[in-house]
Image (tube, rainbow, N blue to C red):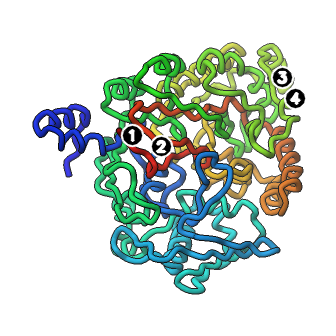
Amino acid sequence: MKILKNLAIATTALALLAGPAAAQSESSTLVVAVPSDPQSLEPGTNRAWPVGSEVILNVFDTLVAWSPPEFSSLEGRLAESWTVSEDGKTFDFKLREGVMFHDGTPFNAEAAKYSFERTSELNSYVKATFGLIESVEAVSDTELRIMLSAPYPAFLSILAQPQAAIVSPTAAEEAGEGFASNPVGTGPFKFESYSADTSVVLVANPDYFRGAPGVERLIFRVIPDASTRRLELESGGVDIVQQQGQLSSPPAQDVAELSENPDITVLEVPSQIIRQFEFNNSLTDGPYADARVRKALTYAIDYEGLLAGIFGGTAERVYGPLTTNSWAFNPAMKEMAPTYDPEKAKAMLAEAGVDPSELSTKLYSFQGQLWGAIATFVQANLADIGVNVEIAQTEFPSYRALHVAGEHQIALDGRQPWYNDPDAHITIGYLSSLKDSAMTFRMGEDAELDALIQKAQQTPGLEARKELYFEVQEQIMEKVPGAYLFSPKLIIFHRNNIDGLVVNSAPPLNEYWSVTKN
């Protein structure tokens, strides 16, 4: 199917030519503007790439999901119910009956077992979590048992992630590596087509077990430029411009101006996303390997100036490894966090015996207008203490490969939690054994910190875990892995004829099953 670049013009022309029938077709198509081409449209290879992850949650189902509109508790999807053993290591699920994959094959416990084992084999990104799975057993067609090697209180949250979605074994085996470009799930929408750098087209699954979606067609339209996305939203060329989970956001003035547009609704929700100025903590030589140098640079950044000058109320300060709205946030982080003090930064470098010129390097950053502004701001802050860095904005796939390989000294990076638990930030971000598995802080080996992180991950009981995570945060701050910059709000713009859209923050991705277009 040929994907038309200008959907708005095309659908309007069809409406004029064909009358009411074409107009009805336009109203049943939901167009979502996204800033980048999707990376991997299937669970087995997806590594939390934002656009691809959102496509997955609309094509596939997970066993459990966060319940809208509060997203504070889990509900069953492909699982009707579940129980957890007293030792926290055995999870028994009662699965839904009569659910079919898009290719007409039945969903059952064997399909779920196949999916978990397949993703565990293919996807190193889930090593920290799926690595705890000791066995998966299809007890019967409707009964699934998952046994872990150690207690993991956040495991149910993991099962709500895109990487835990259930695939059609038949389609996956037949397609092989091609399954990533022709995914088959049980979700509310079926995959129809993908056009590189242009769009992903999904069509409604009329037999979806929760009921047919509110629109007949869902198009993710790739529009890299923020100003173009805004123009398309204002003209009606797109219905939704969604930013949560993305690597780019609108300029602050766009939020204020679009809030005044009677045709546009702006949704804002606090997030647990963290964006940071990050060091490569696996370096064993050179000035950036010295914690005193790293700490000095954290005092060079004007945190409040960054929030006021670039974000205009659309982001909040982050003081440490967790956001202030995390249930495990340690209030002591506010006292341990650096403040803007360039003179102190200079003095600390002098005390470490390091000339600022020795720190000249590339500052890697994501692409986009917002990240360019942040990089320029940080660059200017560092220049004020004599550290001259060159900004290198890089496309996400290339940037990720460079970062995972450790081919950098400093970078602007971030982590968005894909499940509502401190483990989502701490384990993947700071466990040294996972430094090569994703875009992490690339922490050097530290047996004490690693053991504490794993203990906090596995200890039953919310209060006990909270106390452990307090200690984890303090130990991490002492190592100075980076400078924590800000937490952006989840912001979505949509046309006022859109109803039923709810903003999820865990993971920061949207499902469009409930959305209607009038």
Please, is residue 162 above or below residue 486 in the view?
below
Q: CA distance from mark 3 to mark 1?
A: 48 Å
- Name the residue: 34% across, 64% down: 178
Residue type pointed to by label 1: Val
Q: Which residue does the numbered mark 2 point to in the structure image?
A: 500
- Residue 254, x across and y down, in percent: 48, 20
- Sequence-wise first label, 1 or 4: 1
Give the quadrant of residue 491: top right
Q: CA distance from mark 2 to mark 1?
A: 14 Å
- Sequence-wise first label, 2 or 3: 3
Q: Which quarter of the figure is the C terminus placed in?
A: top left
Q: Which residue does the numbered mark 1 point to in the structure image?
A: 32
- Of all residues shown, which one is farthest toward the bottom? 140
- Sequence-wise first label, 3 or 1: 1
Q: Dot 2 lies on which element?
A: loop
- Residue 412, x across and y down, in percent: 61, 33
Q: Is residue 406 visible?
A: no
Q: CA distance from mark 4 to mark 3?
A: 19 Å
Please, is residue 322 above or below residue 145 in the view?
above
- Residue 436, x across and y down, in percent: 62, 54
Front residue of 326/408: it is 326
- Residue 88, x across and y down, in percent: 78, 71
Residue 44 as seen in the image, left or right of residue 473: left
Q: Which residue does the numbered mark 4 point to in the structure image?
A: 335
Q: Dot 4 lies on which element?
A: helix
Between label 2 and label 4, give the one nearer the viewer. 2
- Sequence-wise first label, 2 or 1: 1
Residue 410 as seen in the image, left or right of residue 325: left
Q: Dot 1 lies on which element?
A: strand
Q: Which residue does the numbered mark 3 point to in the structure image?
A: 348
- Sequence-wise first label, 4 or 3: 4
